[in-house]
Image (cartoon, rainbow, N blue to C red):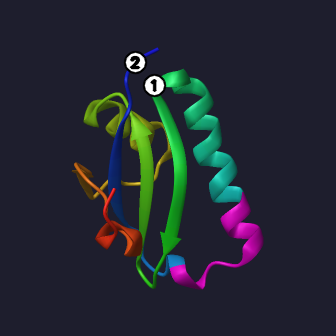
Amino acid sequence: MAVLSKFMIERDIPEVGTLEREQLREAAAKSNAALNELGSDIQWVESFVAADKTFCVYLAKDEDTIEKHAEISGFPATKVTLISKMIDPTTEKPS
């Protein structure tokens, strides 16, 4: 199994924020089908839906795998960013 890196994918999808629960369920099923096709080189962590965009966190072997998922699923990968580090409120505490 490949070592997976964390990526943030920005997807420009007009009016995605107006989709109903059933439409989002169908979108998730479409994404999951693409993930199943690609195998263990990619995992969907979570997505945040805004007015005209989604921001998706994925674990993947590389950016090409993210692009393949976008092609298969039909959801654009407008901007793909490798996440090198993460901070949260607990970061201030000494280790």
Q: Position of residue 68 (x, y in %)?
A: 38, 33
- Residue under the image location 41 percent in, 80 percent down: 52
* Labelled disc at residue 2: 2
* Residue at the spot of label 1: 41
Question: Closer to the N terminus: mark 2 or mark 1?
Answer: 2
Give the amino acid type for the residue marked by disc 2 in the picture: Ala
Disc 1 residue crowd, few under 14, some 14–19, many 20+, Cα 10 Å? some
Q: Give the alpha-carbon distance from disc 2 to disc 1, as whole Å.
A: 6 Å
Q: Which of 74 and 8 is in front in this view?
A: 8
| Number of the front mark, 2 or 1 | 2
At label 1, which amino acid type do we have?
Asp
CB under 8 Å between discs 2 and 1: yes
**Coordinates of residue 3 in the picture (x, y in percent):** 37, 23
Q: Is the magenta stretch mostly helix, strand or loop?
A: helix
Question: Left or right of 26: which side holds 77?
Answer: left
- Could you say whether the residue bearing mark 1 is in a helix, strand or loop? helix
**Label drawn at residue 14:** none
Residue under the image location 23 percent in, 53 percent down: 81
Find the residue positioned furthest to the top.
1
Residue 48 is situated, as x and y percent measured from the top left of the image, at 50, 71
Q: Residue at x 36, y 31 (%)?
A: 65
**Residue 90 on the magenta span:** no
Above or below, 79 relative to 62 = below
Magenta segment, which residues?
A: 17-25
